Image: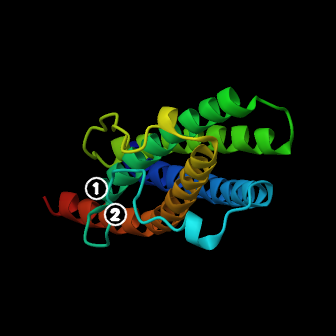
Amino acid sequence: MADRRSGATGAPDQGRTTAARAAAVAELLLLEISNLLELYSKRETFTADVIAGDSRLVSVPPPSSQLDTPDKLWRLHAALLQCRGLMERAIAKEDEEMGSGTGEYETLRKMVKERLSFLINMTGELVKAVDGPAVMTPSLNDSVEPDSLTLFELKLWVFRVFTEVDYWAKTAVTILQALPKERVRTTRHRSTRSTRR
């Protein structure tokens, strides 16, 4: 009986630990993408009217408070997958058009991409842990293909990619920080039901 209890309590603790670690990774990603955006803004000077754009590059709708935990995690995970695809395209296109370098900007850009990949792995684990829907590889919003852009439009598109990653990093922090509280409620509710039987 003691073995069953330790096994039963171990699984929810593991879920909370993964969620807490994922939230910490999301906070680091948010800090790094904010620094990257600041560095990029200093490097490229855009006026406010030029960077104001309503259309989103990620085609996943933002999670709402009405969704349950598995659906929130699924949407977050799918959006982060699209963000990574956008980052990869932005980095490749920038390197192709402007040459690759080894300065602070390139280092930070690489760190953001790696941190994003790590967060994707962690959110994927969380989706599986809460029996969320299977995650399909999402398609990107190809309304503006980087291949057909002028140099100025490319720079603006890269800025929008970084802004999109920033938005989803903030969303990840919010969802993942709230997740442990929700998991505790769900676990207690389930354990009460199983003891009644």
Front position in the image: 100 or 169: 100
Task: Identify the residue shown where x is 58% and y is 39%.
Answer: 118
Residue carrying label 2: 63
Q: How crowded is mark 1: few (under 14 residues within 10 Å), some or many (20 or more)?
A: some
| In the rendered image, the vertical position of residue 141 relative to residue 137, given as above or below | below
Nearer the observer, disc 2 or disc 1? 2
Image coordinates for residue 2, horizontal then vertical, percent = 41, 48
The quarter of the picture where residue 3 lies is top left
**Residue lying furthest right:** 103
Amino acid bearing label 1: Asp
Task: Identify the residue shown where x is 52% and y is 49%.
Answer: 18
How far apart marks 2 and 1 lie (CA) works out to 8 Å
Element type at mark 2: loop
132 lies left or right of 23: left
**Residue lying furthest front:** 150
Q: Is residue 91 visible?
A: yes
Q: How crowded is mark 2: few (under 14 residues within 10 Å), some or many (20 or more)?
A: some
